């Protein structure tokens, strides 16, 4: 895709900025892979396993016939987590963690999907294709998660309802049960208390490497050494993995035991299918691959006769190198181009360090604070291009990286009271000649009644008399009386955009009296 595209940019960031500079912190929960931030590292549980199981239980309500259910974060509803098919604390723990990437563009369901992928990839697993665009359910789905005491026919029927054949059932269960195990508290009939200080919740694991993705679940099963509590449990009624794994005469499990590569590639496909099982009518995006060059968190504001620009750019598949030179070319509205040398600001990694990305800040010198580049407000700015080591021009195939300077936050915004009753004024600078059909504010972090982040827009009334900010911009103002933060947005020729510059009473200077 072509940058900027707010939703794809946000999904791409959640997916690929996994660890290090500007990462969304998802990876910190599963680093190292035996961490369980809620239950504790010696609990016998692990966040990676909880996330994978949560994704499956959320999806497992899907019905291919009527299109209901699927990966839609309906597992967040108490009505679902209190069902006997969903025992344990793992679902709530998972949601509280993966929601760090949930925002106005990344649904809770997308957070669960991307969290599951990042967990698997960083704990020994294969790379998994991620698509975004899941829509969070408004209400619980119909029950239908398989349970261990059910017979093989019920499981074949349940997976068929979810859209999977019997062979795919064997594959998906083996892939999932590469992680984690069965915990005593929710399943006392399957697992006794173990009384082990390194396994305080008494979890009987599916294989000996329960925090790491590998084919041990299959090799141990085929060699007869498995301790999988759903295979060798003392009560055969709950030995569902035994029935499922053996249901094709062990053909699938043998192929997995024989080839770790086949197991990994099969699981990459099966996990992607699981995560992409969504209610009918939901349209997922293309597979989100990393943009080779990606501007990040651009902030543009007007201060008198200058436009102030801050931001960073990320170069994919690049490691840190102090000798490297990176230039940014800023093309303005008058045909002029300014050349700025950028400063390295950090490195991020993805997929357990398989990929690195180098980040550069637009700030003229290293600084902890937001340091802005000052641009002439009359010439403005149209787009950015980049050149690394005097080499190839990075301009997205000629279109450049478009920057909108038509509607920006104005630093004349100010407060009269930063405490209840709040009183402040948000000023937006609109470039003369742009003629937006609307200028509005977008409330940061707004949620609807079922916790879905939503975009709440407040229109700023068009001024009856233009108030000039300088020769090229006029001010649109709105009086505010709350303590929320807002982005500035506008609609021009039917196209909506909104900035990254959030402001509230707390961010402003006092109004002149
Ligand atoms: C017939 C189908 C299945 C049955 C009967 C089943 C049963 C179970 C049971 C009883 C547990 C223990 C949960 C606990 O102790 O709280 C469990 C854990 C788990 N299941 Fe399944 N499962 C099935 C399919 C799947 C699938 C398809 C996946 C994912 C692809 C999956 C992933 C997991 C994971 C990762 C855990 C470990 C959770 C943890 O340790 O916190 N399961 N499963």
Image (cartoon, rainbow, N blue to C red):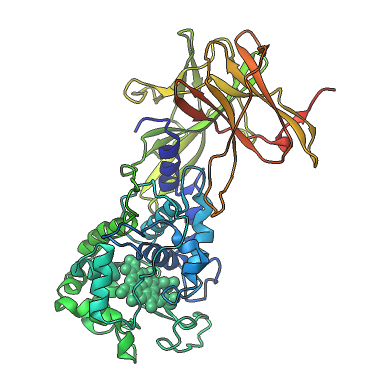
Count the labels in the image: 0
Point 48% across, 11% down: residue? 333
Left or right relative to 396: residue 453: right
Q: Position of residue 310 (x, y in %)?
A: 57, 28
Q: Considering the image in quadrants, where does the N terminus appear?
A: top left
Residue at the spot 24% in from the left edge and 81% down from the top edge: 243
Q: Position of residue 179 (x, y in %)?
A: 37, 70
Q: Is residue 208 visible?
A: no
Instruction: For the C terminus, give its image quadrant.
Output: top right
Q: Which residue is located at x 51 percent, y 54 percent?
A: 99
Foreground pick, 80 / 237: 80
373 to the left or right of 280: right
Q: Nearer the viewer, residue 406 or 31?
A: 406
Q: Nearer the viewer, residue 474 or 94?
A: 474
Q: Is residue 472 left or right of residue 217?
A: right
Residue 132 lies, in percent from the top left, at 38, 46
Does residue 432 sit above or below 354 in this rendering? above
Q: Does 334 sit above or below residue 309? A: above
Note whether residue 30 is visible. yes
Tell which quarter ligand 1 is in: bottom left
């Amino acid at each position: 895709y072509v940058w900027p595209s707010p939703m794809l940019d946000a999904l791409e960031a959640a997916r690929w900025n996994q660890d290090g500079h500007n990462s969304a912190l998802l990876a910190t929960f599963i680093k190292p892979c035996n961490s369980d931030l809620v239950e504790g590292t010696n609990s016998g549980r692990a966040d990676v396993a909880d996330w994978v199981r949560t994704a499956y239980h959320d999806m497992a309500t899907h019905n291919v016939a009527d299109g209901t259910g699927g990966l839609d974060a309906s597992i967040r509803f108490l009505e679902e987590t209190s069902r006997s098919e969903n025992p344990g604390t793992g679902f709530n723990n998972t949601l509280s963690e993966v929601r760090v990437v949930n925002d106005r563009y990344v649904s809770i369901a997308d957070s669960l999907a991307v969290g599951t992928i990042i967990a698997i990839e960083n704990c020994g697993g294969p790379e998994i294709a991620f698509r975004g665009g899941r829509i969070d359910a408004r209400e619980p789905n119909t029950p239908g998660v398989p349970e261990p005491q059910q017979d093989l026919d019920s499981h074949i029927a349940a997976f068929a309802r979810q859209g999977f054949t019997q062979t795919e059932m064997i594959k998906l269960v083996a892939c999932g049960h590469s992680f984690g195990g069965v915990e005593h508290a929710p399943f006392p009939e399957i697992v006794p208390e173990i009384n082990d200080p390194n396994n305080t919740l008494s979890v009987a694991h599916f294989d000996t490497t329960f925090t790491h993705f590998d084919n041990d679940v299959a090799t141990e099963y085929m060699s007869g050494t498995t301790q999988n509590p759903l295979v060798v449990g003392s009560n055969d009624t709950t030995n569902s993995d035994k029935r499922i794994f053996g249901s094709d005469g062990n053909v699938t499990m043998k192929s997995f035991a024989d080839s770790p590569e086949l197991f990994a590639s099969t699981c990459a496909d099966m996990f992607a299918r699981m995560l992409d099982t969504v209610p009918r009518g939901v349209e997922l995006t293309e597979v989100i691959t990393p943009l080779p060059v990606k501007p990040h968190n651009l902030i543009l504001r007007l201060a008198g006769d200058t436009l102030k620009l801050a931001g960073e750019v990320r170069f994919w598949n690049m490691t840190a190198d102090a000798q490297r030179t990176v230039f940014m070319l800023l093309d303005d509205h008058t045909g002029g181009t300014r050349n700025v040398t950028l400063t390295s600001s950090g490195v991020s990694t993805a997929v357990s360090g398989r990929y690195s990305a180098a980040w550069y800040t637009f700030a003229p010198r290293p600084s902890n604070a937001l340091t802005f580049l000052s641009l002439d407000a009359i010439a403005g700015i149209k787009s950015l291009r980049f050149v690394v080591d005097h080499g190839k021009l990075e301009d997205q195939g000629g279109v450049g990286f478009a920057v909108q300077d038509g509607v920006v936050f104005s630093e004349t915004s100010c407060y009269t009271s930063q405490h209840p009753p709040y009183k402040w004024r948000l000023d937006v600078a609109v470039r003369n000649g742009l003629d937006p059909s609307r200028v509005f504010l977008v409330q940061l972090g707004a949620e609807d009644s079922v916790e879905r982040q939503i975009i709440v827009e407040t229109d700023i009334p068009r001024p009856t008399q233009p108030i000039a900010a300088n020769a090229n911009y006029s001010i649109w103002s709105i009086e505010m009386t709350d303590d929320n933060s807002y982005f500035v947005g506008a609609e021009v020729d039917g196209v909506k955009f909104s900035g990254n510059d959030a402001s509230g009473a707390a961010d402003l200077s006092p109004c002149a009296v």
